């Protein structure tokens, strides 16, 4: 058998202006999985696991040893469709179809619903681990395609703005989906992200369904101006330009209603020097970008105070924007 442990970071999708086309990796918070490729089904059976999913190209056993509660049925775990799709692709490349026996132990888990890419970290870590065991048979774009199957399960739509930065790290721009075309943008050294996760439940599915299907031309102009400004800000190492571009007229106006006191919190953060503030992914988490650790800590205090005054439990993460994505431990 072959066994490997992998970390994949938490991520912030959209980053304000880039709905479904941009995301960044966080440094220091993420999932850890240990993946085993067994030589045969008997070897797999020796590992006590009561959570086996059988598909044509693989049998998959998922164990959860983290302190986070996850669905007991493997069909409801985001790792399953991602690994099944990857095994199908692997089998199709062999001279004869093959069947892989795989065990995944989830050892560390971001809490689901936190807005920092919990589902993406799970599927990204699993596909990255299997690829490492399979001697890097697949490209990063292919891994992102497989991991997106998990996002499809959880939100109804495959989108790569969490899984791409979780796999390749840094700030990732998704130029297109057909085929997946990823651009890893440079990350300045002094680029910080503070994220607050208020304990309110908002499902990604619900947060997507609330959005209008069509966008007016005046809004599209604002949005693509900001996406261009954000990307240019990174390429020119101009964090003020980047900050001015963290604006969203597509999702924020509809989703902010899920977050108590959102406008006040945003105003407090911006007036205290944060360069950009917006909803993390589909929410309910809120992120603030800043240029120093001191500012990132100030954002933490403002976020703590805001939700404490509303009697809402929360967690706050202060992170540098991570340059690295998934990695073998
Ligand atoms: N781009 C997705 C959305 C991210 O905003 O719905 C979900 O985390």
Image (cartoon, rainbow, N blue to C red):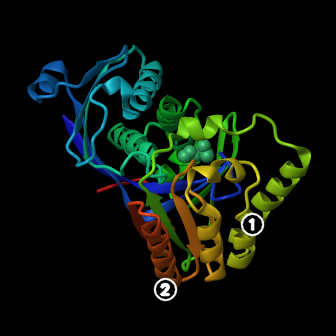
Residue 322 visible? The answer is: no
Q: Is residue 266 left or right of residue 130?
A: right
Q: Which mark, by number, is residue 193?
A: none
How far across and how far down the image is residue 223, in percent? 80, 54
Say if residue 113 shows up in the picture.
Answer: yes
Quarter of the rendering occupied by the C terminus: bottom left
Residue appearing at x 57%, y 47% in the figure: 282
Residue 71 vs residue 227: left or right? left
Residue at the bottom extreme of this rendering:
294
Q: Is mark 2 within 8 Å of ligand 1?
A: no
Q: Quadrant of the N terminus?
A: top left
Compared with 302, 61 (above or below) is above
* Residue 58 image position (x, y, % from top left): 33, 21
Regarding mark 1 in the picture, which secondary structure is present there?
A: loop
- Badge 1 crowding class, 10 Å Cα cut-off, few under 14, some 14 to 19, many 20 or more, is many
**Coordinates of residue 234 in the picture (x, y in percent):** 68, 69
C-alpha distance separating marks 2 and 1: 22 Å
Can you tell which quarter of the image residue 96 is in? top left
The residue beneath circle 2 is 294
Label 2 secondary element: helix
Mark 1 and ligand 1: say if the CB distance to the nearest ligand atom is below 8 Å: no
Identify residue for label 1.
245
Crowd band around label 2 with a 10 angstrom C-alpha radius: few (<14), some (14–19), many (20+):
few
Image-based side of 19 in relation to 224, left or right: left
Residue depicted at 41% across the width and 63% down the height: 311
């Amino acid at each position: 058998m072959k066994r490997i442990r992998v970390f994949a970071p938490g991520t912030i999708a959209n980053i304000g202006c880039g709905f479904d086309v941009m995301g960044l990796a966080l440094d220091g918070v993420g999932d850890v999985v240990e993946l085993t490729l067994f030589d045969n089904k008997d070897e797999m059976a020796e590992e006590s696991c009561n959570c086996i999913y059988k598909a044509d190209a693989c049998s998959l056993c998922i164990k959860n040893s983290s302190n986070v509660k996850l669905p007991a049925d493997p069909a409801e775990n985001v790792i399953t469709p991602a690994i099944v799709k990857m095994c199908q692709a692997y089998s199709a490349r062999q001279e004869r179809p093959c069947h892989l026996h795989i065990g995944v132990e989830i050892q560390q888990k971001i809490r689901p619903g936190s807005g920092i890419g919990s589902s993406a970290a799970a599927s990204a870590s699993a596909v990255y681990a299997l690829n490492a065991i399979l001697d890097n048979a697949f490209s990063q774009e292919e891994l992102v395609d497989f991991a997106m199957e998990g996002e499809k399960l959880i939100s109804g739509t495959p989108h790569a703005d969490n899984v791409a930065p979780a796999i390749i790290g840094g700030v990732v721009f998704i130029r297109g989906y057909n085929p997946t075309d990823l651009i890893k943008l440079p990350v300045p050294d002094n680029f910080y992200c503070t994220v607050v996760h208020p304990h309110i439940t908002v499902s990604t599915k619900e947060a997507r369904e609330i959005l209008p299907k069509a966008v007016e031309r005046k809004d599209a102009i604002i949005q693509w101006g900001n996406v261009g400004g954000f990307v240019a800000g990174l390429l020119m190492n101009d964090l003020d330009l980047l900050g001015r571009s963290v604006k969203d007229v597509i999702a924020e106006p509809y989703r902010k209603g899920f977050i108590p006191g959102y406008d006040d919190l945003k105003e407090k953060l911006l007036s205290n020097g944060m360069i950009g503030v917006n909803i993390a992914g589909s929410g309910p988490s809120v992120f603030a970008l800043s240029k120093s650790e001191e500012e990132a800590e100030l954002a933490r205090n403002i976020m703590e105070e805001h939700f404490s005054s509303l009697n809402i439990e929360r967690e706050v993460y202060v992170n540098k924007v991570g340059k690295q994505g998934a990695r073998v431990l």
